[in-house]
Each structure stands twice: as C-alpha cells, then as structure tokens.
C-alpha cells in the first residue's frame, strides 16, 4: 500500500506578497507482517525542506481502526510544528527476547518513542476508550521478573512548547513519560494503566519523569508501581495537579546525587489536588548523602490519601538498602555533603495509613528497600533530615488515622531543624502545633 499523503496548500491573500504555506498530513500505513514504526522512521530520511519533509509543519496520524506494529524504537528528528495523533492502537512486540533485542541493539535511542528536540510539538491520543492505546504487554515481563533491557516509553526530550494529551498506555514494561530538557510543556488527560493482574509487581513503571522548566501536568490518571510523578535535577516551575495516582510510589521530588562532584538543584515545584490510592508514598522528597545541592520552594497541598504506607516522607539520606548501609552522619557534618532543602510546605493532607494487610508489593527483600529503622508503621510524617541543611519545612492541616483505627505517629529529629514544623518534632505521637507561615 502506498503511503496516503495529502499536501494541502493554503494561499494567504491577505499579505501583499502572497505566501504559500505547505502542511502535510501523513497517515501511517499498516502492514500486518511488518514493523510499522520502521516504515514511519524511513519517511523522515527524505531531504529537509521538501514537501515530503514530515519534520516541519505536519500532522502524522496513526489511524483509528488499525492496530499498528510498534516493533522498533523510533527516534524523531528535530520537529517544528508537528502533531502526532495516536488514534489507532499500537502494540509492542509481545515476545520478550525479541523486544529485549530491540533495546539492546546498537542505535537504540533510549526509549520506544524518542523525541530529540524541536518547537511546537504535540503528541496526542484520543478520547475514544477503545482506541489510541499503546500496549506494552508488560504483564509477562512483570510475571517473569524480567528486568534486563526493558524499554522506556515516551521520551519527550528538549521540546520547546510541547503538548502531550489524551495518550493511553496499557501495561507498559517500565518507565512511561520523560520530559527532560523541555520548556513550556502541557501534559494532560493521559492515562497509564500498569496494574498487574497477578501477584507480580509492575516494577519501575514510573508515570511522569519531569525535568525542565514551565511544565504543567494536569488531569492525568495513573495506576502504576513506581513514582506517579518525579521531578528531578535542574527543574523549575513544575506543577502537577488534579490527578489520580493509584499504587504509586508518590508525588516525588528527587534532586541530589550520591557523589559530591556536581551540584543538584530544583525550585518552584507544586503538587496539588491529588487523590493517592493504595500507594507506598504520598508526598516524597529524596536526596542522597554525599552530593551537594539545593531544592527550594516545593509545595504539596490538597492531597487525599487512602491506604497509603508513608503519606509524607522526606529523606536527605537516601541510600540503596539492598546494596549499601545507611551513611553515617559524622558529629560535625559537612553542609556541602547534602542537598539543602528549604521552603517546603505540606498542607491539607487527609486520609488513612496502611497499618494492616500485606506488605507493599515492591518489597522483595528483607528488610524491604523502603524499610525505616525504628518506625512504628503508623507515621503520617517522616522527616529524615541532614543536620544543618533543612530550613523552613512545614506542615499544616494534616489529618490522618490508621486503617486499624489507631493514633498516628511522626519521626523527626529536633536537632536537625530549627523551625516549627507544624507538629512536635520527635519520634513519637503526632502532636499538631500551629505553625505560622
Ligand atoms: C508487508 O511486509 C512484508 C514483510 O516485510 C513485505 O514482504 C510486503 O511486501 C509488505 N507489503 C506491503 C504492501 O508493503
Ligand atoms: C511552516 O509553517 C509556517 C507557518 O505556520 C511557515 O512560516 C513556514 O515557512 C513553514 N515551513 C515550511 C518548511 O514549510
Ligand atoms: C503549532 O502546531 C500546530 C499543529 O500542531 C499548528 O496548528 C500551529 O499553527 C503551530 N503554531 C505555530 C505558531 O506555528
Ligand atoms: C486497543 O488496545 C487496548 C489495550 O490493549 C484494548 O483494551 C482495546 O480493546 C483495543 N481496541 C481494539 C478496538 O481492539
Ligand atoms: C510556569 O509554567 C506555567 C505552565 O507551563 C506557565 O504558564 C507560567 O507562565 C510559568 N511561570 C513562569 C514564571 O515562568
Ligand atoms: C544537575 O544539573 C546541572 C545542570 O544541568 C548539572 O550541571 C549537574 O551536573 C547536575 N547534577 C547532578 C547531580 O546530576
Ligand atoms: C514558589 O513556586 C511557585 C510555583 O510553584 C511560584 O508561583 C512562586 O512564585 C514561588 N515562590 C518563590 C518565592 O519563589
Ligand atoms: C560525606 O558523604 C560521604 C558519602 O556518604 C561520606 O563518605 C563522607 O564521610 C561524608 N563526609 C562528611 C565530612 O560528612
Ligand atoms: C483540601 O483538600 C481536599 C482534597 O483532598 C479538597 O477537596 C479541599 O477543598 C481542600 N481544602 C482547602 C481548604 O483547600
Ligand atoms: C569532595 O570530593 C573531593 C574529591 O573529589 C574531596 O577532596 C572532598 O573532600 C570531597 N568533599 C566532601 C565534603 O566529601
Ligand atoms: C517558608 O516557605 C513558604 C513556602 O515557600 C514561604 O511562603 C514562606 O515565606 C517561607 N517562610 C520563611 C520564613 O522564609
Ligand atoms: C533506632 O533506635 C535505637 C534505640 O533507640 C537507636 O540506637 C538507633 O540509632 C535507632 N536507629 C535509627 C536509624 O534511628
């Protein structure tokens, strides 16, 4: 079948010198016995500036009614004024070794759909519930605990003025969306369903990995087994709001490094109006002992949590519990040895702490990777701070009970922070104080 291609010519008569502007609409062809993405990729190899140049002023459509063979990873060139519409279904190879070979191959761009830069780029799914799904066939990988050469999903890298909307992901193998290096991005009404039908856990099915500037995430629906969203080093003005997160590892800010070689930073980050259901963490910050940095002005507010293990969790001393032991903080700690945190607010949280029932599913070691020494399992807040590097960290209007109906606790070392944190800073009962902002 020949690619169906429509080049529309639009003649503007308003300007003195008439301009001819070309816009291409390309419907991706489907061949049931071939890889449809390799065919699309070959469309980008024509010389730029020609009418066949899909990288500029074009709409690329995966059409409704077709299930496309998403059998290879695609690396888009730099795009300008391009909209990609996923209106049909797309299916990864369901053979694990075959997909591993795609990821292991030389030239694998880093994710199944890799954007390398550009301006005014839209990736758009559909509101049709039957179509527009990218099916990763992740269940078999989760069941086999297969963690070698797992594909990442959509890497929306270095885009200026980008939109990701109405995309729907079904059982991804691992990580979903990553927006690093992008500026002025709106990510909304996307759905990620990484829910396991068996007892196996959907490891590393991160929802949104945000990095960059001026990014707004809203009305997203995520069921997964890792961070619902995580904001990382070098970010500013990131908002994640009006969302549903189930089974996740939190609304996270992960800024720092385990080595002291480079500074890590982030600021002006807001998470609000989120329902967190049956997750490990609600609001989470983590950085490592050893690396210098600064994270400031981060707010988590209006969070309803149901059946959550750690509703509010801040650690400046993160370490991999499976491969190392907790770093010893010396008597005279070096303030360059931590990512400083300041102006953090946790406001209007309410819900229930899981203190009964099975261990969270990502626990496959003893102790669990998320084990907290001396915790009672009823903590609504855990502040694990690095001495002298945390300033103006506050909580307000926090309401919690445990599922078994008991009182709730906190962990906090008053030697590590000077300000009133909104509760009595101690390892013990949660006793509210009235912090003034
Ligand atoms: C479909 O793909 C097969 C296998 O690559 C190829 O032999 C065949 O020519 C393709 N059909 C069309 C219509 O392109
Ligand atoms: C793309 O469209 C813009 C107008 O939206 C026009 O200025 C530009 O020349 C077009 N570029 C190409 C390569 O057609
Ligand atoms: C941005 O791209 C869209 C198509 O996705 C197009 O309609 C619009 O004109 C572009 N905006 C500019 C400023 O070129
Ligand atoms: C599209 O894919 C989704 C996820 O695999 C599936 O539930 C849906 O039934 C598919 N749609 C059609 C029309 O086959
Ligand atoms: C922050 O990001 C939002 C959403 O992208 C944008 O509307 C707003 O202008 C940005 N604010 C600043 C100060 O850049
Ligand atoms: C953080 O980002 C900055 C700026 O991109 C970079 O120079 C630095 O190396 C990064 N630090 C870490 C720990 O990744
Ligand atoms: C804090 O971040 C928010 C965005 O989340 C921004 O609107 C506000 O101006 C920032 N405040 C300061 C003092 O930087
Ligand atoms: C800095 O952190 C590293 C890594 O944990 C540790 O080995 C080192 O002893 C620390 N040094 C000081 C002075 O805190
Ligand atoms: C507190 O958060 C809840 C959502 O959990 C929201 O419905 C309510 O409006 C918020 N209250 C205020 C005062 O913002
Ligand atoms: C950071 O690393 C340098 C060498 O790379 C070392 O000389 C210095 O003592 C380290 N600083 C801290 C605080 O660990
Ligand atoms: C503490 O942080 C909050 C949130 O960023 C800010 O509004 C407030 O002004 C800060 N207070 C001080 C004393 O810096
Ligand atoms: C746990 O509590 C014991 C006894 O109070 C104490 O010695 C130990 O340092 C605590 N461990 C941590 C990681 O706080």
Image (cartoon, grey):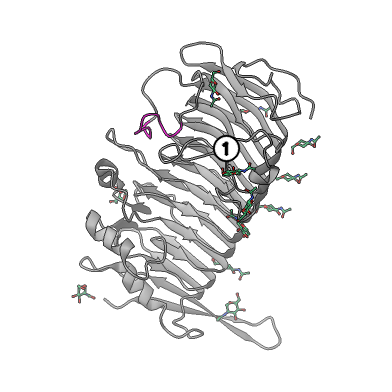
x and y percentages locating residue 160 in the rendered image: 60, 64
Which image quadrant shows ligand 1?
A: bottom left
x and y percentages locating residue 2 in the rendered image: 30, 78
| Residue pictured at 45% horizontal, 34% vertical | 246
* Distance from mark 1 CB to nearest ligand 8 atom below 8 Å: no
Q: Which element type, helix, strand or loop, lies under badge 1? A: strand
Looking at the rendering, the stretch of residues picked out in magenta corresponds to 361-370
Outermost residue toward the front in this view: 331
Q: Quadrant of the N terminus?
A: bottom left
397 relative position to 59: left or right: right
Q: Quadrant of the C terminus?
A: top right
Q: Quadrant of residue 45?
A: bottom left
73 relative position to 82: left or right: left
Q: Residues within 10 Å of mark 1 (few under 14, many from 20)?
A: many
| Residue pictured at 36% horizontal, 23% vertical | 358
Question: Is 110 situated above or below 143?
Answer: below
Q: Which residue is mark 1?
A: 317
Label tally: 1
Q: Quadrant of residue 339?
A: top right
| In front of the other: 242 or 317 | 317
| In front of the other: 109 or 388 | 388
| In front of the other: 216 or 342 | 342
x and y percentages locating residue 168 in the rendered image: 41, 50
149 relative position to 8: left or right: left
Question: Is 29 situated above or below 341?
Answer: below
Give yes or no for residue 110 being in the magenta stretch. no
Q: Main secondary structure of the magenta part?
A: loop
| In front of the other: 83 or 178 | 178
| Residue pictured at 59% horizontal, 30% vertical | 303
Question: Is 429 situated above or below 338?
Answer: above
x and y percentages locating residue 18 in the rendered image: 64, 87
The reply to whether residue 296 is in sight is: no
């Amino acid at each position: 079948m020949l690619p169906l291609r429509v080049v529309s010519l639009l003649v503007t008569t308003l300007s003195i010198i008439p301009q001819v502007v070309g816009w291409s609409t390309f419907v991706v062809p489907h061949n049931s016995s071939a890889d449809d993405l390799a065919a699309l990729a070959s469309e980008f190899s024509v010389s730029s500036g020609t009418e066949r140049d899909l990288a500029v002023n074009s709409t690329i459509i995966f059409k409704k009614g077709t299930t496309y063979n998403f059998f290879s990873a695609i690396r888009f060139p730099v795009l300008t004024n391009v909209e990609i519409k996923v209106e049909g279904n797309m299916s990864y190879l369901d053979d694990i070794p075959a997909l591993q070979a795609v990821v292991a191959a030389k030239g694998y761009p880093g994710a199944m759909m890799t954007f390398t830069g550009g301006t005014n780029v839209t990736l758009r799914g559909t509101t049709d519930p039957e179509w527009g799904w990218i099916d990763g066939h992740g269940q078999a990988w989760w069941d086999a605990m297969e963690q070698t050469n797992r594909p990442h999903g959509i890497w929306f890298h270095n885009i200026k003025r980008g939109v990701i909307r109405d995309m729907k992901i079904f059982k991804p193998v691992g990580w979903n969306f990553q927006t690093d290096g992008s500026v002025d991005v709106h990510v909304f009404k996307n759905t990620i369903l990484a829910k396991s039908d068996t007892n196996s856990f959907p490891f590393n099915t991160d929802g949104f990995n945000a990095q960059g500037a001026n990014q707004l995430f809203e009305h997203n629906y995520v069921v997964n087994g890792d961070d619902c969203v995580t904001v990382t080093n070098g970010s500013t003005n990131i908002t994640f709001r009006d969302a549903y997160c189930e089974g996740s590892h939190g609304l996270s800010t992960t800024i720092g490094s385990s080595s002291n070689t480079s500074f890590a930073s982030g600021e002006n980050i807001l998470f609000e109006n989120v329902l967190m259901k049956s997750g490990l963490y609600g609001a989470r910050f983590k950085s490592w002992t050893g690396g210098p940095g600064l994270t400031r002005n981060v707010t988590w507010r209006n969070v309803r949590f149901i059946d959550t293990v750690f509703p509010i969790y801040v650690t400046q001393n993160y370490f991999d519990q499976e491969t190392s032991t907790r770093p010893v903080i010396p008597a005279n700690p070096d303030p360059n040895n931590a990512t400083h945190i300041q102006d953090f607010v946790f406001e209007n949280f309410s819900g229930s702490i899981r203190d009964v029932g099975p261990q969270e599913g990502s626990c496959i070691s003893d102790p669990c990777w998320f084990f907290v020494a001396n915790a009672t399992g009823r903590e609504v807040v855990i502040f694990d701070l690095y001495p002298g590097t945390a300033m103006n960290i506050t909580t307000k209007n926090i309401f919690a009970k445990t599922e078994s109906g008991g009182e709730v606790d906190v962990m906090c070392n008053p030697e590590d922070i000077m300000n009133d944190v909104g509760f009595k800073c101690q390892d013990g009962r949660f006793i509210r104080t009235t912090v003034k902002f």
